[in-house]
Amino acid sequence: MRSLERPSALSLRPEPGWALFLDVDGTVLHLKATPDEVRRCDRVCRILDELLPCLGGAIGLVSGRPIDELDELFRPHRLPTAGQHGLERRDVHGRRRAGPAPPGLDRLQAGLKAAAARMPGIIVEEKSHAAAVHYRQVPATEGALRDLVRNMVREHAPDMQIIHGHMVIEIKPTAADKGSAIRDFMAEAPFKGRTPVFIGDDTTDEDGFAHVNAAGGHAIRVGHTDRTAARHVLKDVDEVVAWLDSWPACLRHAAPETGRCA
């Protein structure tokens, strides 16, 4: 990762040969106090309706949320989706793949839930293959919470990885990440042969940025950070959504001889 001033992604011009991958919370949907408060956004779903034919269907979601939650947020769309940071994945044909749950996850989740019951404002998000501990409502607990999670992971699930994000501590197996999810999508239609573009806002997106860079694509980080592998930035969710809203008109008027926006 680099600590450099990066250009805005608004300087990029979308091309029909791109494959678009989107993180969700903090990228195209605003963060809320709790994950359950995030709601479907009609504007984002309308943009997807318009963008899908422009990109030949090459749009995928790559999120820490489980696939079933993402389907609810983006209904009626059932996009190619990587959930739980790539630990579960659904391809364009609707086929779902997921490995076994990691050893010790049940004990870890139970321990975290018991601890959270003694810490008002802490939310433990239980997933089939991972867990997340949210402290957005009580940011002063960050230091104590980091120690608690580290000790519990060491005791119950030592092979799992801890990732610190925006007011959240993610605990996941090391077997998959957002980079490997994008790699797997790019080996399949309709993504194969296209240029990957990935937009994300948090530490868990860095594996995706690194893969996209290596593949010659465009990695875009949302929000300010001193260190990221992304080579372009956007200010916030509103700027992401407004930029994506401009894509369909640009793509429909792309110069046929170059594939670039005229």
Image (tube, grey):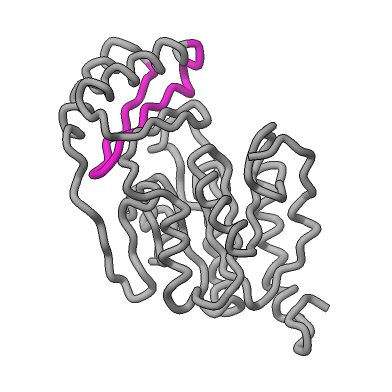
Q: Is residue 134 magenta?
A: yes
Q: Position of residue 2 (x, y in %)?
A: 68, 39
Q: Position of residue 30 (x, y in %)?
A: 56, 41
Q: Is residue 65 magenta?
A: no
Hey, which quadrant is residue 104 in on the image? top left
Q: Position of residue 215 (x, y in %)?
A: 58, 63
The residue positioned 70% from the left and 76% from the top of the image is 251
The residue positioned 20% from the left and 34% from the top of the image is 105
The residue positioned 48% from the left and 78% from the top of the image is 190
Residues shaded magenta? 121-140
Q: If the image is split into quadrants, where does the N terminus sit?
A: top right
Q: Nearer the viewer, residue 85 or 134?
A: 85
Q: Is residue 250 visible?
A: yes
The residue positioned 75% from the left and 88% from the top of the image is 256
Q: Is residue 69 visible?
A: no
Hey, which quadrant is residue 117 in on the image? top left
Residue at the outermost bottom position: 257
